[in-house]
Image (cartoon, rainbow, N blue to C red):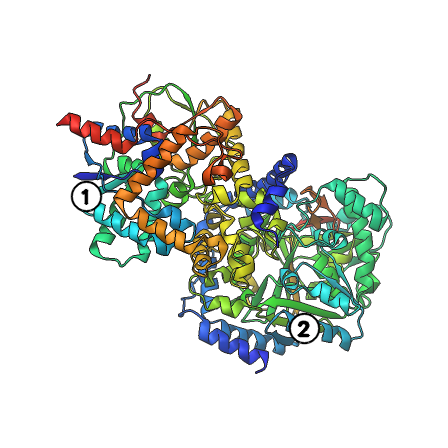
Amino acid sequence: MMPHAQKAAIFNKDEARTDWHDASLWMVRKKRDFAVSEIPEWEFLREFASDIKMHTLSKLDDYLEAFEKAAIQNGAIVHWAADAKEHNDIVLSILNKHQAKKMVKSKSMLTEECHLNEFLELHNIEVIDSDLGERIIQMLDEPPSHIVLPAIHLKKEEIGELFHRELHTEKGATDPQYLTEAARHHLREKFHTAQVALTGVNFGIAETGEVVVCTNEGNADMGVHLTPVQIHSMGIEKLIPRRSDLAVFTRLLARSATGQPVTVFTSHHRNPKPAGEMHIILVDNGRTEQLGKPDFRSSLKCIRCGACMNTCPIYRRSGGHSYETTIPGPIGSILTPGIDLKKHGQLPFASTLCGSCTDVCPVKIDIHTQLYKWRQIVSEAGLPEGGNKTMMSIMGSGLASPSFFHRLGNIGRKLLRIFPGKERFLSFTVWTKDRDLPKAPVESFREWYAKQAKDAK
Amino acid sequence: MKVGLFIPCYMDQFYPQAAIATYKLLLKLGCDVEYPEGQTCCGQPLANAGNEAASRGSYLHFVTMFEKYDYIVAPSGSCVYHVRHHFDTLDQTDAVKKVRAKTLDLTEFLLDVLQISSLPAKYPHKVGLHQSCHGLRGLHLATSSELVNKPSASKLHELLSMVEGLTLVELDRKDECCGFGGTFSVKEPAISVKMGKDRIKDHFSKGAEVITAGDMSCLMHLEGIISRQNIPIKVIHIAEILNADGI
Amino acid sequence: MPSKESILSKIKANRPNLWPLPDVPIFETLATDKKTLFIQILERGGSKVHCIDDSTQIHQVITTHFPEDKRMISTLPTLEGIEGITTLHPDFYEGTEVAIIEGLIGVAENGALWVTENELGNVRVLPFIAQHLVMVISEKNIVGTMHEAYKILGLPTTAGFGVFIAGPSKTADIEQSLVIGAQGARSLLVILTP
Ligand code: SF4
């Protein structure tokens, strides 16, 4: 795996493209700001959302059982999956039961996390992602680079070329309207021929057993209502207690995500359609473990709005793929170290700890504080990102000792006086590749202070 | 009221003029201010790099050095944030509690403790204000742009408005991070530099002659890029402006 | 151990102490004129709104907006001469040019209209599969915010499916440029009755 810094450096080689990527996402952030400005009680809503989620987490077992009971009463079939493999096996068994070979799928970060598509394709199932952005990256065989805007890293010329190849659109055509129309025709056919539809879940409601799915394109509903079998894959943290809690979350979600006042479709699925079948798969896959970490459990409040990505100055300038995780950006950097510390332990360092993510997050996850805390764990574990522990502890004692400290500082400054500007020496080489070092003054503040104190006497 | 002055290590060595301005400004405003010479570092650089455990010694040293003061003032929101927020890993003795509560950034000390409403300062220049993140979102020295519906307030703006002759420029992105981030600046140099470049461009294109901030570390990073690229803009710590006499 | 039991027991072992569940107040909109806000937000989201003062005018409004002789499906009991629901088979409705349905609640703050499968003649796919969608709603049923809407909705009793629809289907997945008419209806016309 290539370190984030290296991927980011490659991304930054094309500065014009970096600027374009940054500007696209900043525009989304600005739309969010405007949408938020229309709700005077916004900060209260964040507080309520956070509390509702924390409450649910504190009784998650009870709520899951209540949810299951209600869902079964509604006529749904509820499955429990401990991990990705079990989830995928359940999906496959449902497909097999119906001898289905074709499945349409709407956006679901959970199935990305489980690598469901690859798994089903191995079993000769055709999976069609029906969200436009998802369909684009599926055709390109790439993972999404953003949880809400999966193809945000692509230019329309690239999509035009892809569609020319795959959907026989005119060569050189790049008009989004035209390309979207082509995808519409292509997907309509798929909706009518698939036997099973799978969706992600934005919210599961414990008191009613409903699953709520939010989309703009209407693709999830096209799939669910046209196929006889519907499957909803849901992370166990997606529960909320009451139907009325949706008021809080629907107000927060779309405004945070894209700056719309609400998603175009907010669908509440309670029972199967006549002669249809409805499955709900409740998935753990590491969530219960995260729940057991007091410093990090609040990351489970996440409603996957993507706002922390749009606001993150690093994400905007390195792209989602640089994180090499299903969920990139700030939230990904606090979720994934808990899954595989060795692999993702570098991500908490891909941040300046500026805190913008924390202030933008609609459910008030203290993302940047958790990044800081992950750093401690990474270095405790002796991973290279945390620095050399022995060196660090020597440095630490040095910093606690005035005489050592002053000598060190003075030596540093004097070296700088001898080798000013662009000279590359010591470990300053990284700093000085594109930055000069500060000009070292003749005397330090300490020296100045001592002198003037003496003069005053 | 006795004030202990804390000067971050890199400021002591590389930006003494900003530290001197802080000291002189406090004197000018009638404070009994002292720089305890045994001081070292607040421990932030190591801790942010993931080595909180190794910085315990410097935390304790900081507390010993400063517990006798009524207030501890530093011209650095970042160090102040570290003391206030991350010294929570120490045993919370009375001394630790006192030091944490009484350590203030220069700008909040001026406005909240001294409650000044005017300054004898003159600085006839076009200035761009960089809101350093730790001061902004950590110490709430200003309302961050994400908190759209909170009444907008900014201590740095308030202080700069007291300076005669100074014009502030309007930025496109009023509080985006400069990309320094301590350890980040050398772990992720490509993005760090790109973020710095983008900030400088925003200030420069709005006609700023000078970029100021409450944290010298951000400015050191920006200055490094400015100097390398020969951009005709300068950086200056806010204390130097607040202490300026117009020359 | 079956996964259900193992997941539940892990949660029991790992969950935090009980966190209180807040009572969320019914935040109301500050707008004095909900109808105007509702129309404004709908139009901002790419919908058209037509106000009439008598529900006998619905037919007329529809033919003005859709003059061509194309397939229309209506679930409104009052609309004579327009095809109704004849089968529950969803594929049958492919090729519907215009679907005309009733909205139960309109939400001013976001332009969303609530409809359940009862108003869809149990053809859940209808508002999605049609090329164009017409929703008829009485202005008496406009509320300010989502809180008010969910308060009226309460818990579901009969309907197994319900949806808030806030405009035509749309996407911005190609370079963030807004395209109206992604997979669902290409336009939404809201007819406001007294
Ligand atoms: S962490 Fe917060 S801001 Fe980021 S995706 Fe989750 S809910 Fe949205």
Left or right of C23 in this view: A219: right
In percent of the image, x 60 and y 61: which residue is there?
A: A202
Residue farthest along the top direction in this orientation = B247
**Looking at the picture, how far across and down is residue C16, in whole percent?**
42, 69
Q: Which residue is mark 1?
A: B69
Q: Is residue A227 visible?
A: no
In percent of the image, x 72 and y 52: which residue is there?
A: A137
Estimate how packed mark 2 is, as few (under 14), some (14 to 19) or many (20 or more) residues with alpha carbons within 10 Å: many
The residue under label 2 is which amino acid type? His
In percent of the image, x 23 and y 31: which residue is there?
A: A449
A21 versus A1 height, above or below: above
From the image, which quarter does the N terminus of chain A lie in? bottom right
Left or right of A348 in this view: C124: right
Q: Report the disc number at residue A279.
A: 2
Q: Report the disc number at residue C54.
A: none
From the image, which quarter does the C terminus of chain A lie in? top left
**Looking at the picture, how far across and down is residue B167, in whole percent?**
41, 22
**Front residue (pair C79, C110):** C110
Estimate how packed mark 1 is, as few (under 14), some (14 to 19) or many (20 or more) residues with alpha carbons within 10 Å: some
Real-space Cα separation, disc 1 to disc 2, in angstroms: 66 Å
* Dot 2: chain letter: A
Q: How many marks?
A: 2
Q: Nearer the viewer, mark 1 or mark 2?
A: 1
* Dot 1: chain letter: B
Residue farthest along the left direction in this orientation = A457
The residue under label 1 is which amino acid type? Tyr
